[in-house]
Amino acid sequence: MKFHTRKWVKPEDLNANESLFGGRLLQWIDEEAALYTIIQLDNERVVTKYMSDINFVSAAKQGDIIEIGIDVVKWGKTSITLSCKVRNKMTHQTIISLDQIIMVGLSESGLPKIHGKTEIEYIKDRIEEND
Ligand SMILES: CC(C)(COP(=O)(O)OP(=O)(O)OC[C@H]1O[C@@H](n2cnc3c(N)ncnc32)[C@H](O)[C@@H]1OP(=O)(O)O)[C@@H](O)C(=O)NCCC(=O)NCCS
């Protein structure tokens, strides 16, 4: 699993227990999944279709640096299934894990669009191909 994104837990991210608010964490995960999907499907119109059980394993507190990891579980026809783990950058303790996040790529008319992708691609390779 590649951990692309780091976040710094700030006062505005906390719940009443003074630990990281779950809604904020899910917002960060959803954004990371969307960015990952936009890049992989080469399509800016993507939506979150489904998220599996969400397991909040441990809490993060103010000042913690956390990192968000995403992996591809399955390439569908119009969808991509991702897994996600968020961990403490310093201790690698898991904060949350999701086995399945299903993202769907849409056409301009807002319908599921066949993407034809079957493996992870890197932007630098796409750029080199087009040079
Ligand atoms: C995403 C959306 C266009 C899909 O429409 P749909 O009628 O379910 O379309 P389809 O049945 O063709 O399914 C599209 C893909 O989603 C998958 N899918 C649909 N329902 C699913 C479910 N309940 N669980 C898992 N995957 C599902 C299908 O397997 C298919 O994948 P594939 O083409 O790779 O095999 C529609 O459900 C939608 O607009 N949902 C709201 C999305 C949204 O607003 N998200 C929050 C904001 S980003």
Image (cartoon, grey):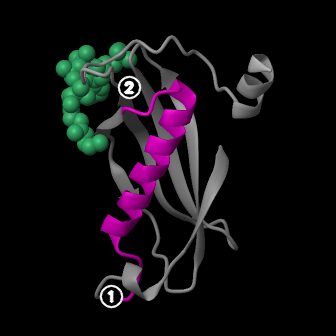
> In the figure, residue 40 lies in which quadrant?
top right
Image point 61% across, 58% down: which residue?
A: 5
The x, y position of residue 104, in whole percent, is 35, 27
Nearer to the camera, 1 or 130: 130
Question: Callout 1, which amino acid?
Answer: Asn
The x, y position of residue 53, in whole percent, is 32, 47
Q: Considering only vertical position in the picture, is 71 above or below 59?
A: above
Marks 1 and 2: in contact by CB < 8 Å? no
Q: Provide the residue span drawn in magenta.
A: 17-45
Q: Is residue 38 magenta?
A: yes
Q: CA distance from mark 2 to mark 1?
A: 37 Å
Q: Which residue is mark 1?
A: 17
**Position of residue 126 in the picture relative to residue 9 (left or right):** right
Q: Which residue is mark 2?
A: 105
Q: Considering only vertical position in the picture, is 24 above or below 82?
A: below
Task: Tell how many labels.
Answer: 2
Question: Callout 2, which amino acid?
Answer: Gly
Q: Considering only vertical position in the picture, is 50 above or below 12?
A: above
Q: Secondary structure at mark 2?
A: strand
